[in-house]
């Protein structure tokens, strides 16, 4: 039924919990998982503003930050890929830069997935909100089924 799943992760506890659900979907016919990490372009811009205080050019500092964040993300994505492959699930990994919910929806369509599985809250983990802004926007903007995993 859900042969190809998109699993967007920000490596938060809630997204790690969602990975457990992805693994369980193997018994429901999942054969392939696209593991996605979206590097939020706004976060890179905010971090680069600190370059002004240390006397570096913003664009050079932005490039340095992006390279570091991409390398870190790719390393973590490879760990997730290994976990899935050990369970007998084919996995592809992608790290992209952009607005998280927009990239998730775009890649879900591009990859022609049959399901998106993501955590209800990401790194911000704001209390008192039913859904995080990324998960809420994904649900609103995609035409794919979405499984939201609560943080509890």
Image (cartoon, rainbow, N blue to C red):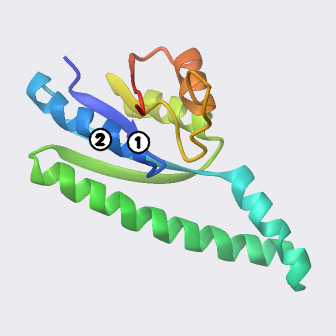
**Residue at the spot 31% in from the left edge and 22% down from the top edge:** 114
The front one of 80 and 105 is: 80
Residue 142 placed where, x, y %?
A: 52, 19
**SS of the residue under disc 2:** helix
The CA span between labels 1 and 2 is 7 Å
Position of 34 relative to 54 (above/below): above
* Image quarter of the N terminus: top left
Q: How many marks?
A: 2
Which mark is drawn over residue 140? none
Q: Which residue is mark 1?
A: 15
Q: Quadrant of residue 27?
A: top left
Residue 88 placed where, x, y %?
A: 9, 46
In-image side of 31 versus 6 (left or right)? left
* Image quarter of the C terminus: top left
Residue 62 placed where, x, y %?
A: 74, 70
Mark 1 touching mark 2, by CB under 8 A? yes
Residue 92 placed where, x, y %?
A: 30, 49
**SS of the residue under disc 1:** helix
Q: Quadrant of residue 4?
A: top left
**Residue at the spot 90% in from the left edge and 85% down from the top edge:** 55
Label 1, residues with CA under 10 Å away: few <14, some 14-19, many ≥20: many
**Residue at the spot 31% in from the left edge and 62% down from the top edge:** 78
Label 2, residues with CA under 10 Å away: few <14, some 14-19, many ≥20: many
Which mark is drawn over residue 19? 2
**Residue at the spot 20% in from the left edge and 26% down from the top edge:** 3
Q: Residue furthest bottom?
A: 55
């Amino acid at each position: 039924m859900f042969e190809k799943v998109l699993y967007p992760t920000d490596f938060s506890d809630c997204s790690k919990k969602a990975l457990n659900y992805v693994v369980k979907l193997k018994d429901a016919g999942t054969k392939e998982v696209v593991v996605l990490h979206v590097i939020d372009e706004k976060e890179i811009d905010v971090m680069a503003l600190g370059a002004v205080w240390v006397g570096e050019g913003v664009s050079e500092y932005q490039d340095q930050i992006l390279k570091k964040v991409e390398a870190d993300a790719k390393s973590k994505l490879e760990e997730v890929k290994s976990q899935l492959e050990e369970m007998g699930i084919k996995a592809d990994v992608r790290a992209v830069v952009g607005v998280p919910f927009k990239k998730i929806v775009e890649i879900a369509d591009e990859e022609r997935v049959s399901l998106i599985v993501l955590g209800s809250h990401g790194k911000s983990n704001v209390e008192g909100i039913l859904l995080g802004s990324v998960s809420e926007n994904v649900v609103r903007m995609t035409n794919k089924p979405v499984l939201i995993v609560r943080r509890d």
